[in-house]
């Protein structure tokens, strides 16, 4: 399975996870995903140490925005990928 396929599966898992989710600020229930991993657009957080300008680590996130108030919520893609692996192991 390619990384593009995995990213699509992660996106579907996130959509399922968000069913019934309401914005903690305005209680609105419609969100848009900012990231477009199939097109190379992905939110990354770079982790730096001290004054070193080179990042030591990075974390890939999935970012959603409330379409009513603009509240931003982020989810670590690594955690979602782990859930996919666990789900696949349960099906075997």
Image: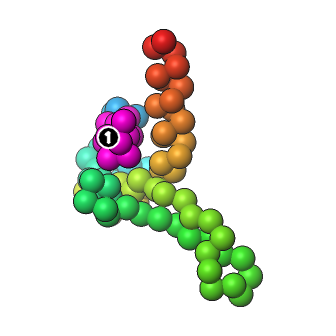
Residue found farthest to the right? 50
> Magenta stretch containing residue 6, yes or no?
yes
Left/right of residue 17 with respect to residue 50 in the rendered view: left
Is residue 55 on the magenta stretch?
A: no
Quadrant of res 46 = bottom right
Vertical placement of 46 versus 51: above or below?
above
Residue 66 can be seen, yes or no:
no
Most foreground residue, 28 or 88? 88
The quarter holding residue 40 reads: bottom left
Number of marks in the image? 1
* Helix, strand or loop: magenta stretch: helix
Task: Tell me which segment is drawn in magenta.
Answer: 1-15
Residue at horizontal 44%, vertical 50%?
A: 24
Q: Is residue 75 left or right of residue 15?
A: right
The residue tagged 1 is 5
Q: Tell me the SS state at disc 1.
A: helix
Colour theme: rainbow
Residue that sits furthest to the top in the current view? 92
Decide: is 51 above or below 45: below
- Residue located 53% across and 46% down the image: 78
Identify the residue at image location x=41%, y=63%: 43
* Label 1 neighbour load within 10 Å: few <14, some 14-19, many 20+: few
Q: Nearer the viewer, residue 24 or 55?
A: 55
The reply to whether residue 5 is in sight is yes
Q: Position of residue 79 (x, y in %)?
A: 54, 42
Q: Residue at x 69, y 84 (%)?
A: 52
**Which one is in front, 15 or 82?**
82
Residue 11: horizontal and vertical position, in percent? 34, 42
x, y percentage for residue 81?
A: 48, 39
């Amino acid at each position: 399975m390619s990384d593009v396929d995995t990213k699509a599966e992660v996106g579907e898992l996130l959509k399922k996870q968000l069913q019934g989710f309401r914005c903690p600020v305005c209680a609105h229930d419609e969100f848009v995903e900012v990231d477009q991993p199939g097109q190379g657009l992905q939110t990354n957080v770079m982790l730096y140490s001290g004054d070193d300008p080179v990042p030591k680590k990075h974390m890939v996130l999935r970012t959603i925005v409330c379409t009513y108030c603009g509240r931003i919520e982020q989810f670590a893609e690594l955690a979602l990928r782990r859930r996919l692996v666990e789900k696949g192991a349960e099906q075997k």
